[in-house]
């Protein structure tokens, strides 16, 4: 067994459910590393019966957790952040082993967990409600925010720990309990995080079922979460097709959902851009996490007069991309998560060629000895296209970057918006009129719109999420916490008589 697993309390065989006790009993799953295809450990998925017990305990834990004062809940989240600080290196290594992103990005992901805990601790004293002037004499109108219930957190493979923490840190200070169903591709990191949360909750004498876990397939365990009214909020991160399914099931029972779905990030490079900034931002955005971020840069829309120079310089970077074992610092790009991801990438490249795109670089699967045997390594692909071809409008979750020209800034913004996803966008320009237009109501239609920095690498302080088929959800910073609470409006009468609103009289 890899020693890092032991450091995080994992074994060769791990139960995949937690409701205060560790439970398994279902299908055994062998988890392999995308780095070299070697087995890491096995995980016992939960059965529907075990899931029922997990949900029941999470629901029961909510009844008491919601009554704990929010600043006290904040103390628990502070301790969670401290525990994550202690385990930062080990957890980042496990993220890299199980998911394949570079260790420096794994460290960044765990840092994001720590940051959101810090944010949530402050938030625990700021769950403000408004008071409003009443239209009636000697009346007061106020809003309060109350805990919501069990939050079902369903996560994607590509941010196997950060997305849980964004949801969990907020849900906990808001007085909710969390039931996590991670991606079946990354169950070990989920077990490691849950063990950390368990230790913290036990240390305070709280019910550890406040942070529960149910590992299993989306089609069985996921659907149990989607359809059960005891799950007050389903926070789902994943593909657009998955989100469409989850969203409609949750909506049918009038549950709440936060949908964080696919993106198709674009960067506009103006002829008034600093090309160094453009190159660095776009290169990281396209090859970071091997193009497997929801905010990855997938399209570059370049003003035609600077396109030739920009193309050459970007190609230079692409040609020397260091690809290899993501645990080693010299490599900027590790493997894709699995063979299916490689096949999807190769199919997209074949399609774009057929639709009129010209491959300028890359797009091949790498084989030993240049990379480790058993891993899914590819070269990043740069493709020149005349505009948004059909395949360009799709999110291919791989390092494929489409380069296209534009003439006017209005045309560039129209190209940027002409896709069904609306997550992340950016403009690189030193012209304030261009950047302001990009940020205006007539500009980018995305949830994230950056100026002189790329599409990926969001900070936790802002609300994160996107429009259109990205699902409309927001999580992380700003006032995203409101989705994790229920709002109650109260009219309080201290006049000693009854006065109706809108001047309605009652003659009795
Ligand atoms: P995926 O859709 O294959 O899986 C996501 C999660 O959904 C997994 O936990 C999976 O088990 C679960 N699932 C599958 N069927 C389900 C069902 N019927 N009910 C409930 N859950 C079900 O996505 P993936 O390949 O793991 O991740 C990549 C996708 O996620 C990309 O589209 C990416 O853009 C998106 N993503 C979005 C964000 C964001 O914040 N917008 C962040 C990360 C990833």
Image (cartoon, rainbow, N blue to C red):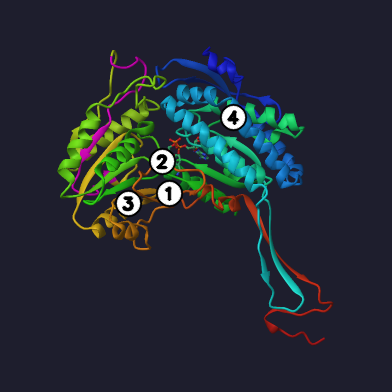
Q: Position of residue 457 (x, y in %)?
A: 42, 40
Q: Residues within 10 Å of mark 1 (few under 14, many from 20)?
A: many
* Label 2 CB-ligand 1 distance < 8 A: yes
Mark toward the start of the polypeptide (3 vs 2): 2
Q: Which mark is residue 470?
A: 1
Mark toward the start of the polypeptide (2 vs 1): 2
On the question of residue 357 being in view, the answer is: no
Cα distance in 3D space between marks 4 and 3: 38 Å
Cα distance in 3D space between marks 4 and 2: 24 Å
- Depth check, front residue: 227 or 211: 211
Q: Give the labeled residue for mark 2.
A: 294
CB under 8 Å between callouts 3 and 2? no
Q: Nearer the viewer, mark 1 or mark 4?
A: 4
Cα distance in 3D space between marks 2 and 1: 9 Å
Mark toward the start of the polypeptide (4 vs 2): 4
**Secondary structure predominantly adopted by residues drawn in magenta:** loop
Residue at 20% across / 44% down in the picture? 385
Cα distance in 3D space between marks 1 and 4: 30 Å
- Depth check, front residue: 224 or 362: 362
Q: Nearer the viewer, mark 3 or mark 2?
A: 2
Q: Give the labeled residue for mark 4.
A: 84
Considering every residue shown, the one lying at the far right of the view is 496
Q: Nearer the viewer, mark 4 or mark 3?
A: 4
Q: Which portion, as a residue range, is magenta?
A: 370-392
Would residue 144 be found to the left or right of residue 185 on screen? right
On the question of residue 129 being in view, the answer is: yes
In this view, 508 is above or below 430: below
Membership of 306 in magenta stretch: no
Membership of 372 in magenta stretch: yes
CB under 8 Å between callouts 2 and 1? yes
Q: Residues within 10 Å of mark 4 (few under 14, many from 20)?
A: many
């Amino acid at each position: 067994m890899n020693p890092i697993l032991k450091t995080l309390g994992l074994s060769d065989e791990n139960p995949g459910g937690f409701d205060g006790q560790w439970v398994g009993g279902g299908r055994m799953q062998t988890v392999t590393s995308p780095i070299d295809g070697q087995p890491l450990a096995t995980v016992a998925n939960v059965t529907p019966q075990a899931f029922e017990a997990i949900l029941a305990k999470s629901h029961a834990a909510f009844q008491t957790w919601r009554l704990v004062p929010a600043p006290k809940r904040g103390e628990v989240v502070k301790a969670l952040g401290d525990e994550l600080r202690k385990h930062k290196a080990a957890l980042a290594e496990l993220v890299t082993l199980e998911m394949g992103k570079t260790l420096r990005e794994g460290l960044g992901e765990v840092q994001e967990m720590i940051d959101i805990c810090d944010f949530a601790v402050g938030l625990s004293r700021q769950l403000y409600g408004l008071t409003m002037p009443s239209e009636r004499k000697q009346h007061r109108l106020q809003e309060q925010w109350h805990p919501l219930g069990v939050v079902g957190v369903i996560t994607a493979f590509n941010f196997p720990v950060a997305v849980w923490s964004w949801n969990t840190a907020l849900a906990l200070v808001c007085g909710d309990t969390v039931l996590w169903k991670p991606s079946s591709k990354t169950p070990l990191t989920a077990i490691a995080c849950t063990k950390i949360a368990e230790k913290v909750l036990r240390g305070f004498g709280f019910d550890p079922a406040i942070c529960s876990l149910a590992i299993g397939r989306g089609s069985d365990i996921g659907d149990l979460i989607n359809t059960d009214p005891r799950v007050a909020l389903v926070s789902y991160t994943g593909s657009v097709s998955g989100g469409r399914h989850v969203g409609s099931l949750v909506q049918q029972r009038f549950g709440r959902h936060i949908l964080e779905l696919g993106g198709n990030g674009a960067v506009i490079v103006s002829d008034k851009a600093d090309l160094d900034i453009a190159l660095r931002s776009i290169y990281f955005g396209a090859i970071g996490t091997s193009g497997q971020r929801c905010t990855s840069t997938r399209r570059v829309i370049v003003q035609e007069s600077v396109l030739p120079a920009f193309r050459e310089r970007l190609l230079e970077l692409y040609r020397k991309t260091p690809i290899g074992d993501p645990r080693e610092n010299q490599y900027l790009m590790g493997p894709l998560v699995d063979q299916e991801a490689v096949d999807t990438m190769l199919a997209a490249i074949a399609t774009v060629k057929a639709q009129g795109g010209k491959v300028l670089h890359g797009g091949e699967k790498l084989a030993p000895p240049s990379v480790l045997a058993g891993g899914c390594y590819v070269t990043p692909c740069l493709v020149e296209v005349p505009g948004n071809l059909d395949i360009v409008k799709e999110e291919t979750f791989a390092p494929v970057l489409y380069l296209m020209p534009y003439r006017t800034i209005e045309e560039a913004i129209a190209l940027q918006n002409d896709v069904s996803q609306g997550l992340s966008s950016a403009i690189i320009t030193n012209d304030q009129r261009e950047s302001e237009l990009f940020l205006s109501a007539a500009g980018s239609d995305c949830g994230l719109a950056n100026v002189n920095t790329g599409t990926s690498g969001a900070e936790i302080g802002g609300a994160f999420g996107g429009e259109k088929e990205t699902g409309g959800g927001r999580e992380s910073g700003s006032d995203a916490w409101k989705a994790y609470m229920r709002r109650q409006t109260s009219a309080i009468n201290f006049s000693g008589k009854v006065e109706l609103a809108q001047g309605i009289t009652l003659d009795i």
